Image (cartoon, rainbow, N blue to C red):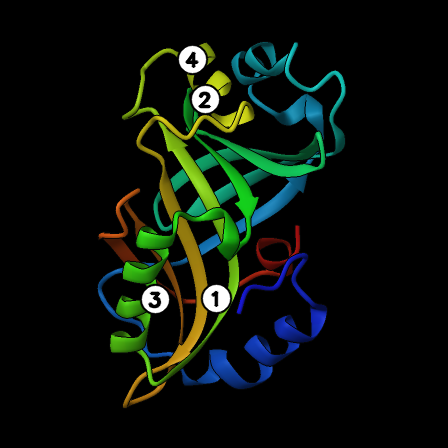
């Protein structure tokens, strides 16, 4: 079941029930993000976004810390869709993500994803789903923006899914990355989930 926009009660559930039960393992996403001013966002990234956000709404800028890495992210609503654009520490484009629902994933891909989740967890709740376009598709930023904002389905996008689930041992919050065909690319557990990380 996909919920968007996520209900604040989910956040309460994660904090009071799930988080205390999580065991930290090798692949752990210890990400924190903080809202910052536009003036503190990398200038090279702002120049790249200059003509992209003229009609966007709810624009917010973030600085992220993930273990030893620092990055930046801008979140906004454009043409009724929620997007986020991520940059590295010096403002180079890393990926573009768009919030979607289960119905937006091709049926065959969704079936493979659901099969994995059912095998991996006894019970689970999907917190959010994003279609992800990375610089592995193209190194040209303008082309990547074109793919993402025009919802191009003819290129190899990924699907990033955040879930709260329980396996045979304990609860966990996980971020799972699937290919366009539904194959698992990466799985990371959350050491913690911040409020801004759950609610757009």
Residue lying at 71% horizontally and 30% vertically, measured from the top left = 79
Q: CA distance from mark 3 to mark 1?
A: 24 Å
Q: Which residue is mark 4?
A: 143
User: Number of marks in the image?
Assistant: 4
Is the Cβ of the residue at disc 2 closer than 8 Å to that at disc 1? no
Front residue of this view, candidates 192 and 13: 13
* Mark 2 vs 1, N-terminal side: 2
Q: Nearer the viewer, mark 3 or mark 1?
A: 3
- Nearest-to-viewer mark from 2 and 1: 2
Residue corresponding to mark 1 = 192
Marks 2 and 3, how far apart in space? 26 Å
Mark positioned earlier in the residue sequence (4 or 3): 3
Residue 155 in picture, x, y percent from top left? 33, 27
Q: Quick one: SS at disc 3? A: helix
In the rendered image, which residue does mark 2 sit on?
Answer: 147
Which residue bears the numbered disc 3? 114
Q: CA distance from mark 2 to mark 1?
A: 32 Å
- Report how far apart the C-alphas of labels 2 and 4 lie in the structure: 6 Å
SS under mark 2? helix
């Amino acid at each position: 079941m996909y919920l968007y926009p996520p209900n604040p009660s989910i956040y309460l559930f994660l904090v009071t029930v799930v988080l205390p039960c999580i065991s930290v393992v090798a692949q752990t996403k210890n990400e924190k993000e903080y809202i910052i001013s536009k003036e503190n966002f990398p200038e090279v990234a702002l120049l790249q976004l200059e003509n992209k956000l003229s009609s966007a709404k709810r624009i917010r800028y973030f600085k992220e810390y993930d273990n030893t890495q620092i990055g930046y992210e801008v979140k906004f609503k454009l043409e009724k869709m929620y997007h986020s654009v991520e940059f590295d520490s010096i403002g180079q484009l890393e990926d573009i993500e768009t919030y979607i629902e289960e119905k937006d994933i091709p049926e065959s891909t969704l079936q493979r994803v659901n099969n994995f989740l059912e095998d991996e967890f006894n019970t689970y709740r999907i917190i959010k789903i994003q279609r992800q376009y990375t610089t592995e598709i193209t190194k040209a930023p303008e082309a990547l923006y074109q793919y993402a904002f025009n919802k191009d389905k003819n290129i190899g996008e990924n699907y990033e899914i955040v879930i709260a689930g329980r396996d045979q041992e304990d609860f966990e919050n996980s971020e799972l990355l699937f290919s366009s065909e539904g194959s698992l690319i990466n799985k990371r557990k959350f050491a913690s989930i911040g409020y801004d990380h759950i609610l757009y």
